[in-house]
Amino acid sequence: MHDNTDEFRDRPVAVFGAASGIGRAAALAFAARGARVAAFDVNAALLNGLADEMRAAGAIQALTAAADVRDSASVGPALQKAAGELGGLDHMIFTAGILRVGFLADMSERDFDDVFAVNMRGFWVTMRAALPLLQGGPARRRAVTAISSAAAIRPKASSGAYAASKAALSHLVRVFSVELAASGITVNAIAPATVDTPMVAPYMGPATSNHGYRLTGTSPMGRIAQPADIADACLFLSSAASSYITGITMPVDGGSTAALPAS
Ligand SMILES: NC(=O)c1ccc[n+]([C@@H]2O[C@H](COP(=O)([O-])OP(=O)(O)OC[C@H]3O[C@@H](n4cnc5c(N)ncnc54)[C@H](O)[C@@H]3O)[C@@H](O)[C@H]2O)c1
């Protein structure tokens, strides 16, 4: 058994896609445990106020900065500067993501490419920037957690490109986990079903114009996940309690992908 009291205190953590939803909840969860948190997002305006919120939650140190995971020239310098200020990098949470809905035959090339550029390639770009910083630290728990999706396990009609990008993200996680296993860095993904965030807000309620795109919605547990449910799983996959877990895509979905419910 591991005593995880205070285990994130003083630890430097970077969160990508931190301005909203799951990323914001993850940044605040680490902040509440006294971590040193760098919160990055492409939407700089949405980051306003988050550093103060993180400090109020308990962060020993908190900073926010604009970074676009599609662009290594943006991610690299932002991460290096943050690691310099925070005293290294122990944990990286990758939640940046976009959803574009539509039948595969109808989607624009632009939407298809954008989904892969952020959800899949963005993770690779961010990992390449983070790795020298993760490896440069002293021998202590270092972990990477990416937010994949239940769609990586069970894709849906009308979000095929998104599902394929998340399946590819989970594959990158698997390969990184083995390539980095000897260094002691664990790399895992989380597969949520519907989480109550701005990303899916337009699709709550009856499917209308979006080619019938349907959220998974309420899980067999009788509710929709909140961002904090996923942030808790990020804490677990960064903790000493999960130090022998690497390469997995862990459903955190209230049983949504476990079995089809009775009708
Ligand atoms: N909400 C759900 O139902 C759900 C379900 C499964 C998986 N996910 C995944 O969880 C992750 C977080 O989503 P969310 O629901 O919190 O959505 P969200 O829209 O609230 O947050 C996503 C954040 O990513 C940022 N982002 C987008 N493109 C970026 C880029 N190029 N560089 C940096 N940041 C960028 C956005 O600005 C936003 O702040 C995503 O990867 C999403 O695919 C969400």
Image (tube, rainbow, N blue to C red):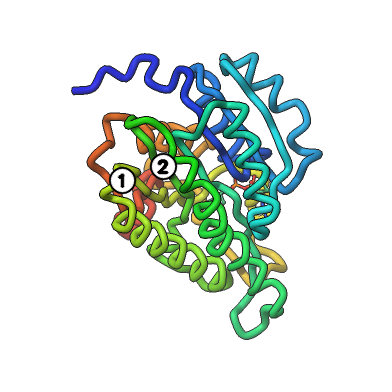
Q: Residue at x 49, y 55 (%)?
A: 216
**Amino acid type shown at disc 1:** Ser
All told, the count of numbered labels is 2
Find numbered disc 1 in the image and state the secondary structure of the residue it sits on. helix
Apparent side of residue 218 relative to residue 247 in the rendered image (left or right): right
Reading the image, the residue beneath label 1 is: 183
Residue farthest to the bottom? 105
**Mark 1 surroundings: few (<14), some (14-19) or many (≥20) residues within 10 A:** few
* Coordinates of residue 111 in the picture (x, y in percent): 69, 71
Q: CA distance from mark 1 to mark 2?
A: 7 Å
Q: Residue at x 51, y 46 (%)?
A: 130
* Coordinates of residue 234 in the picture (x, y in percent): 43, 37
Apparent side of residue 213 relative to residue 217 in the rendered image (left or right): right
Find numbered disc 2 in the image and state the secondary structure of the residue it sits on. helix
The relative height of residue 113 versus residue 207 in the rendered view (above or below) is below
Q: Are marks 1 and 2 in contact (CB under 8 Å)?
A: yes
Residue 212 visible, this angle: yes
Residue farthest to the left? 1
The relative height of residue 250 versus residue 233 in the rendered view (above or below) is below
Q: Residue at x 60, y 50 (%)?
A: 96
Examine the image and state in which quarter residue 21 appears: top right
The disc placed on residue 135 is 2
